[in-house]
Amino acid sequence: MQTATDSKPGAVVFDRRQVYRPFLERLNPIGSQNHLADDLIVAPDHDPRDTGEPPIHVAFANTAELTRGSQMALVGGIGSGKTTELLLTQKDLSRHTDAVNIFVDMADYTDLSEVSPGAVLAAAGIQLYSHACLRLQKQGKELPETIKSAHTKLRELALGKTAWIHEDEDYGYEPDRFVEVTTPGVMKLRFPPLWPKAEQIQKPLISIASPLLESDSQITLLIDGLDRLIQPELFRQFAEQDLQALKGTKISVIIVAPLLAWYDKSRFLQDYFDVVKHIPAAAVGPRNSAFLRQILQRRGALDLMDRTEIAAIAKYSGGVLRDLLTLARSSAEYAYRDDEDRIGRPHVNAAIKQLGNRYLVGLGYAQKRLLRGLTNDGKFPIENSSARELLVNRQVLEYFKGGVDYFAVHPALAKVLPKTE
Amino acid sequence: MTAFSPTNAFRLLRRLAAVGLDTPSLYLLISEAPNIQAIQADITAEAQVQLGVGPRELAATDVRIDRLEDASAQDPDRQVTLITLDHWMPKLVKALDRNIVLLTRSGAVLLLAKPEVAERLLAAAPNLRNRLTDVLEIRLDEAFGGPMP
């Protein structure tokens, strides 16, 4: 806590940064492998919707290990801890030496504002190729030509290619001469057929995976990022194309899905996936509150604040894990700003107000009316588009307690929401 | 607009210095339009004095999503990125929202916007909103009566 200064030889001054910096570094709210390695993650000890069931990451890992080729979806609101669950699953899966676990955040591969079906297959194929190369290298084997050419083909399909052709070259393709005629069949397919692009990418992907599959490896793709598409219908396209293309390949998939897919009337998630898990916000209660407090304590909160401040942060986070860390971080920054050595209630209150204001900004009359309706009468029409926006934006949180799903206004927002218009 | 905690460039950079640039942070800074240029200059000066780095300044039109992460990871002198959103750009906001993880892996990213743009941004970008470290109303030093201690 004290550092030597050069102002007076031998003098020691207090450096408050050293009080807060280690804590703030541990509060980085982005789930990462570093947090697992540093033992900062508090793994849930049960399924959030069923205390008698194992936690989500255990259930996913068991399914992937026992039923190769299974497809699983993880759904939850923004900041609910989906990435952390994927990382925990990946860690569990790594207990077997033949496990090939491929963690992909789609944003690392493609601009998610312009992504199209086939991209998941392409990203998975590129990663699988690296694993196949490493595996064969370790075994002292040459990479077969078929895999090299499959990889070249896959990259071309994924990233495009530029070819030089003669400008007068005739392809013999005259689209105007053909007219599309569709004759409906007697059967409506459960899922649409693969698009040509997805089918094209599927072939090299399977070639690349073949040496791993032939040696009975347990391949699991953990796909993060598509929940940020928000709209269930956009996500659905990837399931119907990319994931469908992986059916029957013995490659397991765990993918995060947007929260609205959970509330989609078509029940697509439940129909399509073998296993679907939902992470609701952690409802207030002794068990969940202890879990939230433990997350902060694991990161060193008790060194800087009392239990009452930790409890207040847990309460006003609404059980949203990222908000929990954001509130702790803001509180620490306010205490530092005020030249305090410990985080006090005024700093926590300021952080809660800031978070509440962040949720308050941009709310229109109709949305405020919905929020008041929920607060006063417990009514929340989830089929209403404004209501869904509130849910996506985490102004309203979805909870599950005692076998019942219910909604509540985010407690930080409730604190700053004007009582009347 | 909803009132957020006020700050100035000195206090903001002091906060960043306390946290250190090893911890990623993403701030939305709201400023009245006429002050934006002066605030950009204040932030640049304070970053050089307090952190010893020159921020990478980007206008909204210059932002390339795929380059943001690479640039901040590879250049230790550019670990502060200041993006000025001087007008509403829905396409950029959508790209920032969906690729938000690229902005929150290393260094500090400061989004500077006038109130109308900030309000629309918060409403239209749920992923980004959830990952913000804080939203602050940034004022010129004079508005605080000079730098705060």
Image (tube, coloured by chain):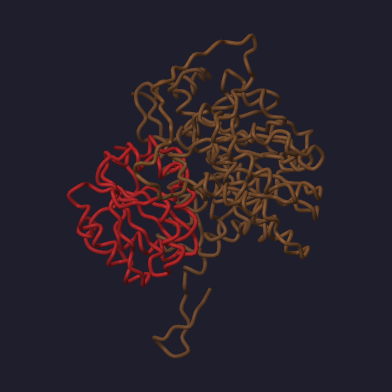
A49 sits to left or right of A241:
right
A137 or B12: nearer the viewer: A137
Where is residue A399? Give x, y as percent.
61, 29
A366 is higher (above) or lower (below) than A7? above
Q: In the picture, which chain is brown?
A: A
Residue positioned 59% across, 61% down in the render? A303
Is residue B109 visible to us here?
yes
Query: What residue do we see at 70% from left, 47% from top?
Result: A209
Q: How many marks?
A: 0
Q: Is residue A118 above or below residue B34?
A: above
Q: Is residue A374 left or right of residue A219?
A: left
Q: Quadrant of residue A176?
A: top left
Q: Residue at x 40, y 60 (%)?
A: A337
Q: How far across and down, in percent of the image, does residue B7 sit? A: 31, 54
Quadrant position of residue A276: top right
Eyeballing the image, is A7 above or below A117? below
Name the tint of chain B in the rendering: red
> Is A187 or B63 nearer to us in this picture?
A187
Residue B88 vs residue A190: left or right?
left
Place residue A404 in its image quadrant: top right
> Can residue A327 be seen in the rendering of this structure?
no
